[in-house]
Image (tube, rainbow, N blue to C red):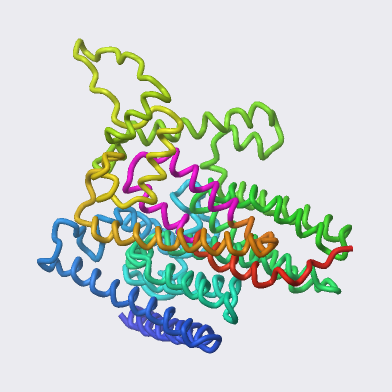
């Protein structure tokens, strides 16, 4: 009994210390700008109080949205939260070795590792998940502030980018459960900020190897986390880093040293991503990474995407993205339907998902950008399900559209002024554009697409900060030899 009480006392002290660290981290951001402090502070309170309300409603089984409760603090809109919590708790029970040498065949092993560490230090409670998400949220905000600027015309878009991340209904909702989404988004943001810092170090008159090593270490850690949660995004970061690192070498005053070090850094990034995501890599991608049968593996990448799309189509679900009459007419012209063979002597029900590539991408993009009440009324697509979350989803879509319009506005202005020369902008463009097309084409279930849309929203927020900052810095020429 005494050892148990001592453990509880130690975890209580550690939790208090974690709260103090959260406060200190917020104070660091607040000192940089008053508005930043208010936005980030409101985001912290919204997540903390939201989690407490949802936890106690579900834990006590209160008569509030009972159809969406899963009990014990969990909710049906986050069905995999209980899965992650269970696996992480099992890792804690097995000890440090199981956490460090995590079984990579488990779902999202990198997230299970960090969640298990938090459970070990702060107790085996569902609410520990929100503590992790709060630290992740602050890390994401810090990355946005470092990428943007808080002086002159660049201040407003940077603040808007912070507000988008802080008050996005979806990001706030996922942060109230032990889910990987908030942590994933923060790791991507920190990766981009580390890339910008890496390039900045190579543009100085004298290369400082210690800060460079720190930036490289941060790149490797964040990529490990990203690839250990979503392998395809880890591969996307590696691909998008190639032109970024090339631009870094070209603009450096020490091109030979920069070329050697940046090539080695890229090889390390690829190896880290391949290591943590190895059990989930499709065979063509694994062969491509190992340099064997590269031409054939490159051709097979299309097959991997098609198989993933077919899997979503086969799974179906209540929130399946179906084409409306307007999109169906366009889709039939792009790819006429072949006669469907009968099943057990009965005529097969016609497919309601788009058949052509144009139709698939269009349906996915419409589901991402256009609110359901608009797309349904126009007969473009039809989405069912929702589980009572449609008000939250629609609000999230409207916020997404506002950020998208602002990104286009500031990017056009910066381009007209001769800006957008910062490779960080194009790094984010490649990442955001690549994941947008991939998700829009592959995922035919709106519930899954809605969860993944936070990755696109993050890209828009980072673009909003970087595009205006790039334009503001465009008068300063890059150092070249």
Q: Which of the 4 image quarters holds residue 175? A: bottom left
* Up/down of 279 relative to 181, above or below: above
Q: Nearer the viewer, residue 249 or 359?
A: 359
Residue extending furthest top? 345
Q: How many marks?
A: 0
Residue 11 % position (x, y): 39, 80
Q: Report if residue 404 lies within the magenta region.
A: no
Q: Nearer the viewer, residue 346 or 15?
A: 346
Can residue 98 be seen here?
Answer: no
Q: Residue at x 82, y 67 (%)?
A: 479
Where, quadrant-wise, is the C terminus in this rendering? bottom right
Residue 320 % position (x, y): 29, 40
Residue 380 % position (x, y): 31, 39
* Up/down of 31 relative to 280, above or below: below
* Up/down of 209 relative to 245, above or below: below
Instruction: Give the main secondary structure of the magenta stretch.
Output: helix
Q: Which of the 4 image quarters holds residue 390? A: bottom left
Q: Nearer the viewer, residue 394 or 219?
A: 394
Q: Report if residue 434 lies within the magenta region.
A: yes
Residue extending furthest front? 416
Task: Left or right? Give the position of 461 relative to 2.
Answer: right
Q: Residue at x 21, y 58 (%)?
A: 70
Q: Which residues are magenta?
A: 429-458
Can residue 81 be seen here?
Answer: yes
Q: Residue at x 61, y 28 (%)?
A: 299
Residue 354 % position (x, y): 36, 31
Where, quadrant-wise, is the N terminus in this rendering? bottom left
Task: Left or right? Give the position of 378 relative to 442.
Answer: left
Q: Residue at x 59, y 66 (%)?
A: 466
Task: Left or right? Give the position of 304 relative to 372.
Answer: right
Residue extending furthest left? 63
């Amino acid at each position: 009994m005494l050892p148990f009480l001592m453990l509880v006392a130690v975890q209580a002290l550690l939790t208090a210390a974690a709260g103090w660290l959260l406060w200190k981290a917020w104070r660091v951001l607040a000192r940089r700008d008053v508005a930043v402090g208010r936005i980030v502070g409101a985001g912290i309170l919204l997540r903390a109080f939201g989690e407490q309300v949802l936890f106690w409603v579900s834990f006590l089984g209160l008569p509030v949205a009972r159809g969406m409760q899963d009990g014990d603090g969990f909710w049906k809109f986050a069905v995999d939260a209980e899965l992650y919590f269970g696996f992480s708790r099992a890792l804690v029970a097995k000890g440090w070795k199981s956490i460090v040498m995590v079984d990579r065949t488990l779902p999202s092993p990198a997230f299970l590792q960090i969640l298990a560490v938090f459970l070990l230090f702060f107790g085996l409670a569902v609410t520990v998940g929100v503590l992790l998400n709060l630290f992740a949220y602050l890390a994401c905000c810090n990355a946005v502030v470092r990428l943007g600027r808080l002086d002159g015309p660049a201040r407003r878009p940077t603040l808007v980018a912070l507000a988008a991340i802080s008050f996005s209904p979806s990001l706030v909702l996922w942060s109230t459960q032990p889910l990987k989404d908030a942590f994933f988004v923060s790791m991507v943001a920190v990766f981009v900020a580390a890339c910008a810092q890496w390039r900045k170090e190579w543009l100085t008159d004298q290369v400082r190897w210690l800060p460079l090593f720190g930036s490289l270490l941060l790149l490797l850690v964040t990529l490990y986390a990203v690839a250990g949660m979503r392998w395809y995004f880890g591969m996307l970061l590696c691909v998008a880093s190639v032109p970024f690192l090339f631009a870094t070498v070209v603009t450096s005053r020490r091109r030979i040293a920069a070329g050697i070090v940046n090539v080695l850094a890229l090889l390390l990034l690829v190896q880290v991503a391949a290591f943590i995501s190895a059990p989930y890599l499709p065979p063509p991608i694994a062969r491509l990474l190992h340099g064997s049968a590269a031409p054939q593996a490159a051709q097979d990448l299309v097959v991997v995407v098609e198989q993933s799309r077919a899997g979503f189509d086969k799974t179906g679900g209540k929130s399946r993205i179906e084409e409306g009459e307007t999109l169906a007419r366009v889709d039939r012209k792009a790819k006429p339907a072949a006669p469907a063979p009968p099943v057990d002597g009965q005529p097969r029900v016609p497919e309601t998902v788009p058949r052509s590539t144009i139709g698939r991408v269009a349906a996915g993009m419409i589901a991402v950008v256009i609110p359901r009440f608009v797309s349904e009324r126009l007969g473009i697509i039809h989405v069912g399900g929702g589980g009572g979350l449609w008000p939250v989803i629609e609000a999230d879509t409207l916020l997404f559209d506002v950020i998208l319009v602002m990104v286009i506005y500031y990017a056009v202005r910066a381009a007209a002024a001769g800006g957008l020369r910062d490779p960080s902008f194009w790094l984010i463009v490649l990442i955001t554009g690549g994941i947008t097309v991939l998700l829009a084409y592959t995922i035919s279930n709106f519930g899954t697409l809605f969860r993944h849309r936070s990755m696109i929203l993050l890209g828009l927020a980072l673009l909003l900060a970087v595009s205006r900052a790039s334009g503001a810095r465009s008068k300063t020429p890059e150092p070249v030899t």
